[in-house]
Amino acid sequence: MSKFEFKARKASGEIVEGIREGSDRFQLSRELVSEGFIPVSIKPAQTKVKYDFAFFNELFVRIKLHEKIMFARNLSSMLSAGLSLSRALSVLHKQTDNVKLKRILKSILEDVESGRSLSQATSKFPNVFSSLFVAMIAAGEESGSLPASLKIVSEQLDKVYVIRKKVSGAMVYPAIIFVAMIIIGALMLVYVVPNLTKSFAEFGAKLPYSTQLVVNSSNFLLNHYLAAIMLLALLSSLIYYGFNSKRGQRTVDYIFLRLPVVSSVVKQINSASAARTISSLVSSGVTIVKSLEITTEVVQNYYYKEALTHAAEKIQKGGSMSDFFKEEEKLFPILMGEMAEVGEETGNLPAMLMNVAVFYEGEVDALTKDMSTIIEPVLMLFIGLAVGFFAISMVQPIYALSGNV
């Protein structure tokens, strides 16, 4: 159907104008005649080109974890209330303000209305819906308990969201101090050191190596500031790409597992995440091997991914979950192996693993609350060393000059 602008005359002689849809102008002309009008002119309507920034908005907008949690939770609630899947998806599509999520929900809705399952529709967007998300939906569809599966997914994602917030919140204070130190150091090199350097030059003082290092850094920053900015950008890029490379991630993960205090947090976060994910998947009807394969994508540390991959291979050959946890005592706490063994003996493995997850999530909560208290003295020591180095480097030549006078 196309839109046409028309002008027609009534029997009274009055001219009427408007826009109407029709398959072609002849069909529209016949409609007007049948309604008692005399067509004067009919031409295709000129549609105004709308310029918007939807493409750019979608390009830069991200779908946050919190939005995925709300999607799963709201969809579960609406299905439990008796709404059909397509109706529930339609409501969520209208409600969301995120342009990227709105487009994805529209695609999912179209797929569901055309006969595809929700798991098939969501699997088209692996960057948004993880394999855990899709597997839980598929398990819910097979068992006829999709609302319950969606509720479990929302709870699982919510726990991940809460832990991330707590860990990132604990790291805000050290990050602010570190950035402030860099800014203050740069200001000292630009404004304070040059004045002291002039005084040293006037008296012909012999500068120690530490002072010479500070002076050379100041001169480089003043005379080659563009090169300094480029060097900083290059160094930042190398660190970023280094950390995101496979070898870099493996190195960082190895260091985190060896650092005091940090290693405890890393082990408990990954153990809790693994236990909760396996428990959720197995309780929803997913096989243990498949659950372990999906869990490898949920845990963050490289060595946990590697261990869970080996676990899937061993269990496929007839091994048990408890034996795996006991063999990997360097990664998983002893309690996890013992609880898994009790779960296997009683036939209640998901419940036992969920208890482990809840316990270690509580431990992570307590550790992250105390983390700022633990980090503070380390930061003070680091700041003290930096300030001490700068003070000694600048004061030492002054003492040498006063001794000569």
Image (cartoon, helix red, strand yellow):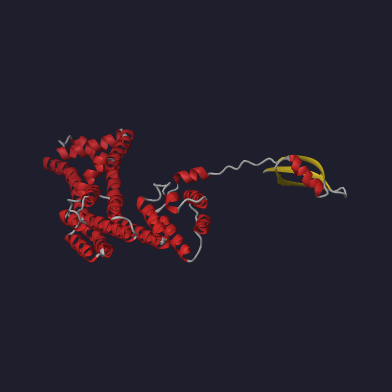
Q: Nearer the viewer, residue 38 or 123?
A: 123
Left or right of 44? Residue 343 is left
Q: Nearer the viewer, residue 151 or 347?
A: 347
Q: Is residue 2 in sight in this rendering?
A: yes
Question: Which residue is at a point 49% across and 43% down the rendered structure image?
Answer: 56
- The image quadrant of residue 278 is bottom left
Please identify the quadrant where the C terminus is shown.
top left
Give the percent coordinates (x, y) of residue 234: 30, 36
Above or below, comparing residue 277 to residue 224 in the picture: below
17 left or right of 328? right
- Residue 34, position as x, y percentages in the image: 81, 48
Residue that protrudes farthest toward the front in the picture: 318
Judge whether residue 298 can be spotted in this image: no
Q: Position of residue 124 (x, y in %)?
A: 43, 46
Pick whichever, 130 or 182, lies toward us.
130
Residue furthest right in the image? 12
Counting every numbered tag in the picture gives 0
Farthest residue toward the left? Answer: 403
- Residue at the spot x=12%, y=40% of the render? 404
Q: Position of residue 243 (x, y in %)?
A: 27, 42
Above or below, comparing residue 335 to residue 303 in the picture: below
**Does residue 132 lie above or below 369 as drawn?**
above
